Image (cartoon, grey):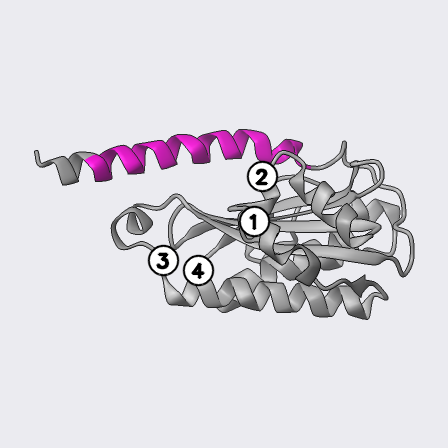
């Protein structure tokens, strides 16, 4: 077996182990399943979505242009939705240089809190997409109180299919039924409706 084949096999195995850990951790991403109403109209720091490719395809072929485009699509969708809900999404220009050095703001040992504090934000939002294969992916979104560091909203959903529609469907479920639900009961939902194409991992 060539050294290149060994490297690919080791990469795939390590990614599979990481995904297994994620599936264990994902149900704990929500803050006990009970959330207080969000403060209306605050300043929000949005630090973007990160993409973690755990697939065999990713190990062989690397970054795909369509997936990069879908990340931008999610980011635009999220910014528009928060603006519609009355939030002021702050510019990241003052922290751009530092943010560029962070590979994944969703997993940076609270650096998202420190960066958001520099912007003067009330809340900070970070997201992550994880790909196991073209059939199995997950989307997670976390919103934290910058002053206390508490998670005020957090949900991970599994989606089926690697398409614009499936990604948007998963994001829409998180925002509609968890982040911006009109009732406390809806905010605690952890099961996607039949036919939605997503299955929730936390709530």
Q: Which residues are magenta?
A: 7-29
Mark 2 residue element: helix
Separation of residues labelled 2 and 3 (CA atoms)? 20 Å
Instruction: Identify the residue shown where x is 89% and y is 42%.
Output: 36
Instruction: Identify the residue shown where x is 65% and y is 68%.
Output: 77
Separation of residues labelled 4 and 1 (CA atoms)? 15 Å
Toward the viewer: 27 or 148?
148
> Crowding at label 1, few (<14), some or many (≥20) Cα neighbours within 10 Å?
many
Q: Are marks 4 and 1 in contact (CB under 8 Å)?
A: no
Q: Earlier along the polypeptide chain: callout 2 or callout 3?
A: 3
> Crowding at label 2, few (<14), some or many (≥20) Cα neighbours within 10 Å?
some
The residue that disc 2 covers is 107
Mark 1 residue element: strand
Q: Earlier along the polypeptide chain: callout 1 or callout 2?
A: 2
The residue that disc 4 covers is 162
Tell which tag, 4 or 3, sits nearer the viewer: 3
Asked if the stretch drawn in magenta spans residue 168, the answer is no
Q: Which mark is residue 108?
A: none
Q: Earlier along the polypeptide chain: callout 4 or callout 1?
A: 1
Q: Are marks 1 and 2 in contact (CB under 8 Å)?
A: yes
The residue that disc 1 covers is 128
**118 lies above or below 196:** above
């Amino acid at each position: 077996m060539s050294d290149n084949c060994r490297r690919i096999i080791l990469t795939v195995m390590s990614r599979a182990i990481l995904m297994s850990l994620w599936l264990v951790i994902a149900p704990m991403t929500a803050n006990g399943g009970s959330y207080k109403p969000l403060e209306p109209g605050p300043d929000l720091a949005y630090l973007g979505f990160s993409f973690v490719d755990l697939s065999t395809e990713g190990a062989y072929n690397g970054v795909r242009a369509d997936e990069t485009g879908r990340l931008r699509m999610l980011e635009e969708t999220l910014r528009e939705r928060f603006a519609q809900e009355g939030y002021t999404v702050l510019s990241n220009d003052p922290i751009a240089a530092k943010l560029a050095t962070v590979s994944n703001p969703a997993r940076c040992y609270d650096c998202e809190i420190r960066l958001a504090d520099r912007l003067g934000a009330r809340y900070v939002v970070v997201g992550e997409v994880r790909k196991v294969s073209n059939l199995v992916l997950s989307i997670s979104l976390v919103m934290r109180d910058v002053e206390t560091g508490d998670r005020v909203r957090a949900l991970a959903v599994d989606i089926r299919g690697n398409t614009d529609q499936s990604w948007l469907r998963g994001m829409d479920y998180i925002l509609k039924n968890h982040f911006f639900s009109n009732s406390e009961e809806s905010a605690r939902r952890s099961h996607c409706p039949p036919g939605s194409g997503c299955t929730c991992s936390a709530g």
